[in-house]
Amino acid sequence: MKVFDEIESEVMSYARAFPRVFNKAQGEYLYDEEGNQYLDFLAGAGTLNYGHNNPIFKKALLEYIEQDGITHGLDLHTKAKREFLESFYENILKPRDMTYVMQFTGPTGTNAVEAALKVARKYKGRENVISFTNGFHGCSLGALAATGNSHHRGASGVSMSSVARMPYDGYLGDEFDTTAYLDKVLSDSSSGIDHPAAVLVETVQGEGGINAASVEWLRNLQDVCHKHDVLLIVDDIQAGCGRTGSYFSFEEAGIKPDIVTLSKSLSGYGLPFAVVLMKPELDQWKPGEHNGTFRGNNLAFVTAKAAIDHYWSDDKFAKEVLRKGEYIEKRLQTIVDKYGDGNMTTRGRGMFRGLNCVSGELADKITTEAFRNGLVIETSGADDHVVKTLCPLTISDENLTKALDIVEAAVAKVLKGEDVPEEKDFFADDVEQENRTLAGAA
Ligand SMILES: *Cc1c(COP(=O)(O)O)cnc(C)c1O
């Protein structure tokens, strides 16, 4: 690890939990330089919904590169962009009866959030925005202001204002509908909450600990927005692109957000790509007013189109996600029933699920033990207390079973009080043997 320790900034994070040098990946498998095989339940934090190096997208990408297709074109019209837009319209927007225009932002999620906030503030001529406890929207200043996590916020170095925080669904217990509180403060001219331009929300909070809002809460939230003439922005960067069992995570609630941000799995291939969808009347931008050198990544257009054509031309894939999601929930519930101490719970929707261990230390021990057994799996939440089962949606049933077996074994081992071995012991001979066997075709 010498070069990483000496040259790479201390800001690295995932690399600390998984101290290996990875050199190959396919589908739900990751490989390190020593030839060990891992099942990947990190999946780029929701960027690899269709698995690593999906062969269908890879073929389209290789052909495009071979033909000297445009790689970089600022926001020029390109054939790749046209084909992506046509496919997105035909397969995603039209069947859902959605009328949105699409803005290509800089290729990170946080830049899409910046653009969404800017356009909402511009359109409404108001500064304040409502975001929620435990929300995560990115690390650039505007998006960070809307983010709850103090670890991230603390790094800003400047004050972050123009955002008011409201309790997310369930924050004050199951009995309390926090949209009623939002309605109350927006109705009260002395609440101290300035009339906002928009409400920014995740339907399932990914980094915040897989907190899933109920469909009723989302509908009530939309009603409150309509009542007070406030725009509804759904940040679908992590929950979107199929993760919850529909292309957009808000479809089940039947709501119609004014603005939607998409990124992570949009390209399908792990290529940087982010967009803002907005109702046409909101599109008040002057040419180039919000731009970015890499807005509209043409290689990502190619793989994103392949992803939509292949997985979203009918509802087969969405049904598969729901089926596997139910299986994950069943397995996690079994773990809770067998080993939980009364506090442990399951969380999430579709294949966006997690095991709430309440304690960050316990969650860390579980993921460390799972990694020792060939499963790359992370935690999320305020205290990193939720084990996040974010595998590729395309995972085989066999590997899904195998991975959840590893999670269950890890929980059993950790809760029986056995010590998790030191990192240097991770690949002691027997474990190494086990992982090489798991490798099969490696
Ligand atoms: C990851 C994420 C972002 C930020 O995306 P980046 O590409 O990391 O800037 C914003 N919102 C949500 C919900 C996310 O999960």
Image (tube, rainbow, N blue to C red):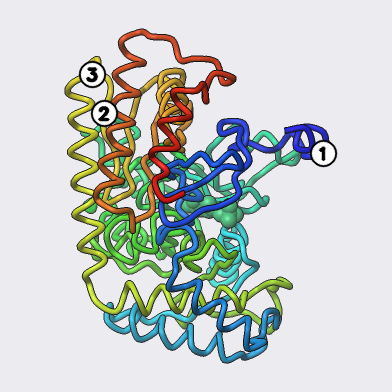
Name the image quarter holding residue 9: top right
Q: Secondary structure at mark 1?
A: helix
Q: Which residue is mark 2?
A: 345
Name the image quarter holding residue 234: bottom left
Tag 1 near tag 2, CB within 8 Å? no
Q: Which mark is residue 39?
A: none
Q: CA distance from mark 1 to mark 2?
A: 41 Å
Question: Between residues 132 and 29, which one lies in front from this camera angle?
Answer: 29
Q: Position of residue 10 (x, y in %)?
A: 74, 33
Could you tell me the amino acid type at mark 3?
A: Tyr
Lower sequence index among marks 3 and 1: 1
Tag 3 near tag 2, CB within 8 Å? no
Number of residues whose C-alpha sits closer than 10 Å to that of mark 2, classed few (under 14), some (14–19) or many (20 or more): some
Mark 3 or mark 1: which is in front? 1
Q: Secondary structure at mark 2?
A: strand
Q: Quadrant of the N terminus?
A: top right
Q: Position of residue 137 (x, y in %)?
A: 53, 50
Q: Residue at x 50, y 59 (%)?
A: 264
Report if the beta carbon of the residue with label 1 is closer than 8 angstroms to ligand 1: no
Name the image quarter holding residue 323: bottom left
Number of residues whose C-alpha sits closer than 10 Å to that of mark 3, classed few (under 14), some (14–19) or many (20 or more): some
Total marks in image: 3
Q: Which residue is mark 3?
A: 339
Q: Which residue is mark 1?
A: 7
Q: Residue at x 79, y 37 (%)?
A: 3
Q: Residue at x 19, y 47 (%)?
A: 326
Q: Position of residue 218 (x, y in %)?
A: 29, 54
